[in-house]
Amino acid sequence: MNTNRNFYLMVAAAAVVVVGVVWWLFLLIGGGMDSDPDKGRGVEGEPIDVTLEFYEKWLIARQSEDSNPYSLNLDEDISLSAELSQQLSDKEGDLVDGRDPVLCQMSVPESLRTVPSFSNDEAAQFLVLSATKGLDGQASVSLRKNGDLWMITKITCGSGEQDPNQGEFSFDKEGLLLKNVPPPLDSQYWHIVFEQDGVFGHTAPLLLGNESVCVSSEGVEELCSDSMFTDTQKVHVQGQMSEAGIEVKKIEIR
């Protein structure tokens, strides 16, 4: 009996050792490795500088006769998230609706300019546009903080002209009004603070014109004027998004 008992104890001990070894190997080979694909990705500095640096490299490569962004491996640039890097790699040789997937232009511009859309300590967004007249494409560039670094996570192409698939207005959102805005936003304009892609805090200046109509909470309709607005007022804004801001057609005051 003692012999059988000792045998079973030895088998049990061996099983424990095997399980321990297997677990150790799992930690060593797979489980203990950092699975974050964005580990170490990103660039130090301000988000606007990170954006401009990447876009300048991509533009110079597009302007070159001897190279292109993909031959220079810019689709694998450290300033890009792993997901965005893969998305750009998959688009090599392809154009999105005839546009470069980063510049978002039909042709290669001579230079670029940026318009801030949203920025805080953890995320930022900018519009990147051509400084060359006649090119109306615009890239909406989103960034987020990755530790102490800034990383570009998303590039969405749009157009300054109305897209017939978007309906009557290229901008049609609810949000809050704000006049006291920090630099680099221009405090001479009222801004709408709105939600986009699940993130509240995006901003855009409101460009009022002779055809900008405001509807009060009582339903009274009249031409818009600055005196009708107050900070944090809830509004519904409809208009056309341009490189300078939203060309307001209608504001409904809630």
Image (spheres, grey):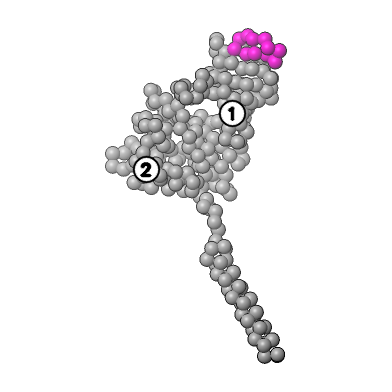
Q: Position of residue 15 (x, y in %)?
A: 62, 77
Q: For this rendering, which residue is in front, 79 or 15?
A: 15
Residue at 65% across, 25% down:
176
**Res 97 seen here:** yes
Residue furthest front in the image: 1
* Magenta residues (range): 213-223
Please give left or right for residue 226 compared with residue 80 in the image. Answer: right
Residue type at the position of mark 1: Thr
Q: Tag 2: Cα neighbours inside 10 Å, few (<14), some, or many (≥20)? A: some
According to the picture, the residue beneath numbered tag 2 turns out to be: 92
Residue furthest left in the image: 66
Q: Position of residue 139 (x, y in %)?
A: 46, 32
Q: For this rendering, which residue is in front, 143 or 45?
A: 143
Q: Position of residue 38 (x, y in %)?
A: 52, 50
Helix, strand, or loop for circle 1?
strand
Residue 189 disc label: none
Q: Is 21 one of the magenta-colored residues? A: no
Whether residue 66 is situated above or below residue 9 in the rendered picture: above
Q: Is 220 one of the magenta-colored residues? A: yes
Q: For this rendering, which residue is in front, 7 or 131?
A: 7
Q: Tag 1: Cα neighbours inside 10 Å, few (<14), some, or many (≥20)? A: many
Asked whether disc 1 touches disc 2, contact meaning CB atoms under 8 Å apart, the reply is: no
Residue 203 disc label: 1
Task: Mark 1 or mark 2: name the one nearer the start of the chain.
Answer: 2
Give the image quarter of residue 251: top right
Whether residue 91 is situated above or below residue 247 in the rendered picture: below
**Res 109 seen here:** no
Residue type at the position of mark 2: Glu
Residue at 28% across, 39% down:
65
Residue at 34% across, 46% down:
71
